[in-house]
Amino acid sequence: MLCSRPCSQGLSRPCGSGSLSGSRRRPDSSRSVVAFGKKGKKKGGGGGGGGGSQAATTEAAPPDEPVVASSGDGELDVTNAIKACKDKMSKAIANVQSNFDSVRTGRANPAMLDNIEVEYYGSMAPLNTVAGISVPEASTLVVKPFDTSALGDIEKAILASDLGITPNNDGQQIRLSIPDMTEERRKELTKTVGKYAEEGKVAIRNVRRDAMKVAQRCEKDGLISKDRLKEAEDEVQKITDGSIKKLEDAAAAKDKDVMTL
């Protein structure tokens, strides 16, 4: 909300009313949730045609601010930026791997249900926190709620998802029979895997950009030498190349898994 009072500091642009502590912060995008409740409504982003559960999105756009705040010590800032770079890239890879796990193959896998949420006593809860999920057979999942009163809501959430499987509710638990996939369907799922991988690459490149900005700012401010800037840029690029390689290897492995009959 913008302040309607004249600015005491003579700024030409509007300022926010209240203190900095009351300013709006950018939400954490590291975990995007697709939720389904009693009405089967989505609470988060979907799309992507994921392979078996609602598609979660990778953290593709880190905050615009630098990876680390300036401390006035150039070497410390660069060191911290490189450390943050490693951590954020690892997190991006983990997020993509989680999305890969949600893409179903021809075999039953509890991770297929990871992105489904159920309305439980007025709150949305991940399915795996309100029910136990087991794999009694290679092509069967069994969902057994800890509280049988939630069985109906669990069934609705599964039906509202893009899992593409009709649950069999026997009053005590839900059985999901995983059908064989056609070659055409498998190829569609490899496109979904590719989409997740590209989102991960965007996230990694954004982290690289922010780390580079910190080093370049320190050199511009005279806090580090040009040689140190070059060293930092080379190190960040090496971390980036390694992270992209891990992502590509994981995508190739998932593609192979999806296409294996």
Image (cartoon, rainbow, N blue to C red):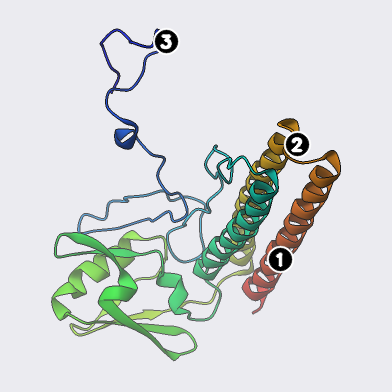
Between the residue at mark 3 and the residue at mark 1, the CA separation in whole angstroms equals: 48 Å
In-front residue for pair 225/49: 225
Q: Position of residue 254 (x, y in %)?
A: 64, 70
Q: Residues within 10 Å of mark 2 (few under 14, many from 20)?
A: many
The tag earlier along the polypeptide, 2 or 1, is: 2
Q: Residue at x 34, y 71 (%)?
A: 166
Secondary structure under the numbered disc 1 in the rendered image: helix
The residue to which callout 3 is attached is 11
**Along the horizontal axis of the image, is 230 left or right of 91?**
right
The residue to which callout 2 is attached is 219
Q: Residues within 10 Å of mark 3 (few under 14, many from 20)?
A: few
Amino acid marked by disc 2: Glu
Q: Position of residue 105 (x, y in %)?
A: 56, 74
Q: On screen, 204 above or below 243? A: above
Between the residue at mark 2 and the residue at mark 3, the CA separation in whole angstroms equals: 30 Å
Q: Is residue 192 visible?
A: no
Q: On screen, 236 above or below 154? A: above
The residue to which callout 1 is attached is 246
**Along the horizontal axis of the image, is 3 left or right of 70?**
left
Amino acid marked by disc 1: Lys
Q: Residue at x 66, y 41 (%)?
A: 214
Q: Position of residue 54 (x, y in %)?
A: 42, 59
Q: Quadrant of residue 84?
A: bottom right
The tag earlier along the polypeptide, 2 or 3, is: 3
Q: On screen, 69 above or below 56? A: above
**Along the horizontal axis of the image, is 146 left or right of 129?**
left
The tag earlier along the polypeptide, 3 or 1, is: 3
Label of residue 67 in the image: none
Q: Is residue 119 visible?
A: yes
Secondary structure under the numbered disc 3 in the rendered image: loop
Q: Residue at x 44, y 56 (%)?
A: 31
